[in-house]
């Protein structure tokens, strides 16, 4: 079990990912759609980490000392630099930043859309791809098997399922709170993006 990559699961679900999860619990078929979304997240995250772990195993990483080696170090600081630029960009353009138009279309989504959204957001969203690359490199540089990523994968799925779990446990309160939280996050999407980028940078260079 490897807990070093566990905090990265927070970044996996920051931004449109958690917004989507909140939107799905406010749809007419909330349970089925949310379950499908969580399943999509689980499938995409597992497949992504499997692929990046395999690819990272082909890189000349320094396993003997536990150091990332030149390739791993370049990846690590390169990703951090990109995220700093994205955070600054979101801050400077905060008055212009609007949530993606497709988020609004999720209000009428069903299970099929929920599954597809989970797969695409985790599998193709740039920040999540960066996280999975980081996890893959981390496992490879320490000579850890894919199974060592299970805490990270479990935490990612748990965070994705948080709105659904709240809906199941506190249905009446969740029905009142979820729309408010959804609207706040949509209105302040730039802030969510900045926090996600900076959190990831801290985790990368710590």
Image (tube, rainbow, N blue to C red):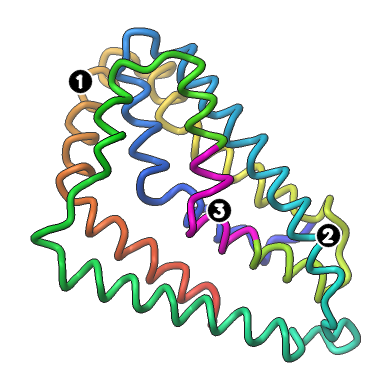
Residue 121 lies in magenta, yes or no? yes
Q: Relative to 155, does residue 126 appear above or below in the rendering? A: below
For image coordinates 42% across by 13% down, the residue present is 110
The main secondary structure of the magenta stretch is helix
| Image side of residue 206 versus residue 154, left or right | left
Residue 127: x %, y % from top left: 48, 59
> Which residue bears the numbered disc 3?
9
Asked which quadrant contains residue 139, the reply is bottom right
The range drawn in magenta is 120-132
Q: Are marks 3 and 1 in contact (CB under 8 Å)?
A: no
What residue would you read off at disc 1?
Answer: 176
Instruction: List x then y, in percent, for residue 201.
Output: 46, 75
Tell me which label, 3 or 1, sits earlier in the chain: 3
Residue located beneath label 2 in the image = 54
The quadrant holding residue 177 is top left
Residue 29 vs 146, above or below: the answer is: above
> Which type of secondary structure does the marked residue at label 2 adopt?
helix
């Amino acid at each position: 079990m490897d807990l070093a990559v566990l905090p990265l699961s927070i970044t996996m679900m920051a931004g449109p990912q958690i917004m989507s999860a909140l939107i799905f619990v406010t749809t007419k078929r909330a349970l089925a759609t949310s379950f499908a979304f969580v399943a999509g997240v689980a499938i995409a995250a597992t497949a992504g980490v499997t692929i990046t772990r395999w690819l990272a195993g082909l890189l000349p990483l320094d396993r003997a000392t536990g150091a990332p080696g030149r390739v791993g170090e370049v990846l690590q600081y390169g990703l951090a630099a990109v995220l700093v630029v994205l955070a600054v960009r979101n801050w400077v353009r905060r008055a212009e930043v609007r949530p993606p138009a497709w988020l609004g279309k999720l209000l009428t989504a069903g299970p099929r859309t929920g599954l597809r959204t989970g797969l695409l957001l985790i599998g193709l969203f740039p920040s999540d791809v960066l996280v999975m690359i980081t996890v893959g490199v981390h496992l490879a540089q320490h000579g850890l098997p894919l199974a060592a990523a299970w805490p990270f994968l479990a935490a990612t799925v748990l965070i994705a399922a948080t709105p659904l779990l709240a809906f199941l446990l506190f249905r009446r309160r969740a029905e009142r709170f979820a729309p408010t939280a959804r609207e706040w996050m949509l209105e302040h999407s730039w802030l969510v993006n900045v926090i996600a980028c900076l959190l990831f940078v801290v985790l990368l260079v710590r």
